[in-house]
Amino acid sequence: ALGNLGANGIVSGGLPIALGAALSCKMRRTGGVAVCFFGDGATAEGGFHEALNLATLWQVPLLFVCQNNLYGLSQPWEETAYQCELPRRAQTYNMPAECVDGMNAIDVYRAAAAAVERARSGDGPSFIEAKTYRFLGHYVGDPAGYMPKKEREAWRKRDPITTLGRQLRDWGYLTEEQDAQMAAEIEEEVQAGVEFAKSSPKPPAEDALSDLYVHFDYQGNPQ
């Protein structure tokens, strides 16, 4: 109902889905804009290039946002890419592209707002590379020993949530008390969600087969 199509476990798998959503917005003239988030590793996949190519060809209202956190699972970005200027890849498909500080919410907001406005005006897709960092491993239980300790500490000092809070307080839009109250309310909401999940009954085993499609070969055998 909110327009969130969810996520999937396939690297670059969300880009073609976002392309379809953007094409739907254009054909139905809803005024909507599709936004797709993906990591730097996705830019080496075919789905990335196919989606960018068709997005420009069809001039759909679509914003591509690459969250470049400098690691593709455990591989440093500079060891897996022939060049690190991702906007150049997007510009190959003749779309506006820029790199922003992904640790600064205001910079991201300004770039995204301009791109969304272009899309709503019928000027097609845009690409944003947000340079950021992940403080933890790639998955639960990943010790992240491949990430240098000093590097992680340096990036943690630039935590975008902490930075935004400081900016809002400096500009007079947020007081220390409001900031603390907001943090407490969010913590309470998160903990309530955790407790709800823990106390909820487990789904029945047959639910594992819900909404699944079985593919059959030409002899009628399930695959």
Image (tube, helix red, strand yellow):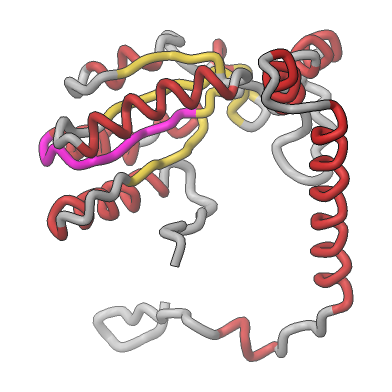
Q: Is residue 76 visible?
A: yes
For residue 176, above or below residue 138: above
Pick whichever, 78 or 132, lies toward us: 132
Q: Quadrant of residue 58?
A: top left
Any magenta on residue 65? yes
Residue 193 horizontal side relative to residue 65, left or right = right
Q: The magenta stretch spans which residues?
A: 57-66
For residue 4, above or below residue 76: below
Pick whichever, 156 or 49, lies toward us: 156
**How many labels sit on residues?**
0
**Which quarter shows the N terminus?**
bottom left
For residue 77, above or below residue 59: above
Any magenta on residue 3? no
Residue name at image x 33 percent, y 46 percent: 34
Residue name at image x 41 percent, y 48 percent: 14
> Which residue appears farthest toward the front when viewing the image?
172
Residue 188 horizontal side relative to residue 15, left or right = right
Q: Quadrant of residue 181?
A: top right
Residue 31, horizontal then vertical, whole percent: 23, 49
Residue 170 horizontal side relative to residue 125, left or right = right
Pick whichever, 69 or 172, lies toward us: 172
Residue 128, horizontal then vertical, whole percent: 40, 23
Residue 25, horizontal then vertical, whole percent: 22, 54
For residue 35, above or below residue 74: below
**Which quarter shows the C terminus?**
bottom left
Residue name at image x 66 percent, y 22 percent: 133
Residue 38, horizontal then vertical, whole percent: 48, 37
Residue name at image x 47 percent, y 80 percent: 212
